[in-house]
Amino acid sequence: MTELAYLGAAVLFILGLKQMGSPRTARRGNTLAAIGMFVATLTVLISLTKPSWTVIVAGLVVGSTIGAVLALRVQMTEMPELVAAFNGFGGISSMLVALVALLQTRALWDNETGVTVMLSIVIGAVTFTGSFVAYGKLKGLISGRPISLPGGKVLNATIATAIVILIVVGVTGDATWPYWGAVGLAAVIGVLGVLPIGGADMPVVISLLNSLSGVAASTAGFVIGNDALIIGGALVGAAGMILTLQMGKAMNRTLANVLFSGFGAISSAGVGDGEEKPVNRATPDDVAIALAYAQSVLIVPGYGLAVAQAQHVTKKLATLLEDKGIDVGYAIHPVAGRMPGHMNVLLAEADVPYDQLYDLDQSNPMFQQTDVVLIVGANDVVNPSARDDSTSPIYGMPILEVDRAQTVVVVKRSLSPGFAGIDNPLFYMDSTMMLFSDAKAALENVIKSLEDL
């Protein structure tokens, strides 16, 4: 019955993951996966021979309380940080499982088990410290700029070599100190590996760490012989790696380039407060007139929309335009926001119809026939330098080619650069209107002006 229960949990995990592939079924998929986890947890509890119910109940109460509070209180803008924290906790959980096995057996096991324990320890420690460095960068506790130590790559290579040596010594011998040494060095390399990565690449890093947390969980499953943990971890590891590679493709960058290039450490020369280069400053009335006389409008959401919690007012504006007979759609870049699917979830929260959301390949052919593109808080993903300037650090990255539309309206607080840390020529084009304001307040004022026309 235990094996059948684990099989049932694994089936629910797979069905849930499959249904998360579409916004229409994602909520149902999340529910199925949660039921699968409940079944797996309940099966573990039932199969215990001498359980310490005080510890178990205390853990369930504390964990459930924290989960419920986070689910109710965390804003969508904080979701990337929450995912990073989840990855870190997943990594350290797997590491602790392996360390408990080490304490219980004193490393008296065969080579296969030793390798599995070492992998769980090393991957778990790297995931834990790396995830919380990513958390700090996203939260603003650590600078989003790449932080490179002198000789950092050589230092990382030396530590990685030392870890490999410790793995060999630990697996082939019967001492416990190589395992503890591997824990310490892996924790250090997790920090040193993420610090040099800029904020523009944090979505890719979070996805990679998510994959590593799954791999750590799967190896921990082998350590304790738990089928559900093996399958669940493998699913997370594979899905996370696929997503990581897809995001790299969306940015036209390899995973090695993301991890080792120090992207974002470039100068933001030319970025200022609007005095160095002239821009077409617009008022809400100007934007309302441009929208009112348009036949087609494409809205490009970005992180600024998320920060301002402007998804609902954006939907209200779109509905108002549709009532005037204007065709409205949403152009979504694969890496818009700070995590994959960030914009899709925000717009779904505002009940934006899924068939109005267009991906990169669908959107770009539409811009030439679009009267007005309304950019709400996006920056790097609409930067034409990625297409036109071979010297730009983001050259070759696929972008939304909004500059091909007749009129571009950019709602932004200032001319400050995006996560890539570079200026955006789009802001200074003759066809671009800059509405400097908080996204939510700006769109509310535009709606008022539209209603008065």
Image (cartoon, rainbow, N blue to C red):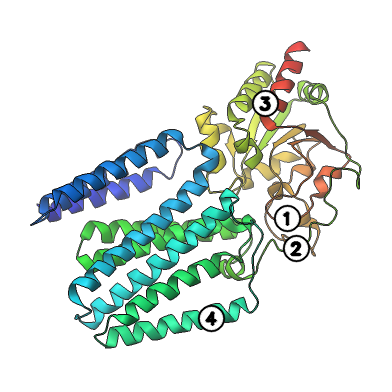
Q: Which mark is residue 421?
A: 1
Q: CA distance from mark 4 to mark 1?
A: 28 Å
Residue for point 71% across, 59% down? 394
Q: Is residue 347 visible?
A: yes
Q: Position of residue 285 (x, y in %)?
A: 81, 21
Image position of 296 (left or right of 127): right
Q: Which mark is residue 439?
A: none
Q: Nearer the viewer, residue 19 or 228?
A: 228
Image position of 97 (left or right of 344): left
Residue at the spot of label 4: 157
- Earlier-in-chain disc, 3 versus 4: 4
- Earlier-in-chain disc, 4 versus 1: 4
Q: CA distance from mark 2 to mark 3?
A: 40 Å
Residue for point 53% across, 81% down? 157
Q: Position of residue 362 (x, y in %)?
A: 62, 43
- Earlier-in-chain disc, 4 versus 2: 4
Residue at the spot of label 3: 327
Q: Residues within 10 Å of mark 4 (few under 14, many from 20)?
A: few
Q: Which mark is residue 266?
A: 2
Image position of 273 (left or right of 420): right
- Which amino acid lies under the numbered mark 2 shown in the image of this protein? Ile
Q: Is residue 178 above or below residue 227?
A: below
Q: CA distance from mark 3 to mark 4?
A: 55 Å
- Which amino acid lies under the numbered mark 1 shown in the image of this protein? Gly
